[in-house]
Amino acid sequence: MPDDRFSALVERVGAFHITDRTMRQAQDAVAQALKDGTLDERQRVTYLDAVRRYFGGFEREARAQLRDVDRRLEQANQVLFNLTAERGVATKRIEATRAVLAQLDTIEERLPL
């Protein structure tokens, strides 16, 4: 007799859209065996192994994707930091040149034409 944890796992796995043929067959066979009350220990162990292989691969893939996204976010943050600093330099340059031009305007006003 399967325990509730095993049945809950079968139900949870069954909620996924499984495209892998081996995993799909294992899922269908175990779900049917649970329904019929014919699940044996060999089938249970085989199913658990199949679930571990299937979802372990997805976890590795997702972790690799997360590392890639984190790396790209780090690069994007560095670009944002650099652009912010560059903007600050450009703003100070505008302020400094504007001050020179304003001073120039006061001198030119005093000169006779």
Image (cartoon, rainbow, N blue to C red):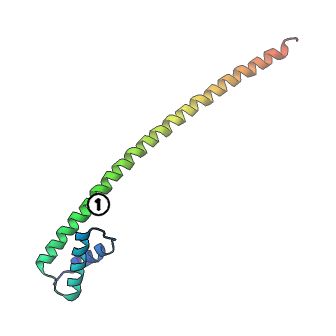
In the depicted structure, whether residue 99 falls above or below residue 13: above
Neighbour tally class for label 1: few under 14, some 14-19, many 20 plus, Cα within 10 Å: few
In the depicted structure, whether residue 39 falls above or below residue 111: below
* Secondary structure state at the residue bearing disc 1: helix
Q: Is the C terminus in the top left, top right, bottom left or bottom right quadrant?
A: top right
Residue reaching furthest top? Answer: 112
Residue 81 lies, in percent from the top left, at 49, 37
Residue 57 lies, in percent from the top left, at 25, 59
Residue 54 lies, in percent from the top left, at 24, 65
Kindly identify the residue that appears in the image at 30 percent across and 75 percent down. 14
Give 63 or 4, whichever is nearer the viewer.
63
Q: Is residue 70 left or right of residue 56?
A: right
Kindly identify the residue that appears in the image at 11 percent across and 76 percent down. 42
Residue 62: quadrant of the picture: bottom left
Kindly identify the residue that appears in the image at 34 percent across and 49 percent down. 67
Give 71 or 107, whichever is nearer the viewer.
71
Q: Is residue 92 left or right of residue 105?
A: left
Residue 101: quadrant of the picture: top right
Q: Is the N terminus in the top left, top right, bottom left or bottom right quadrant?
A: bottom left
Of the residues shown, which amino acid type is indicated by label 1? Phe
Can you identify the residue that label 1 sits on? Answer: 58
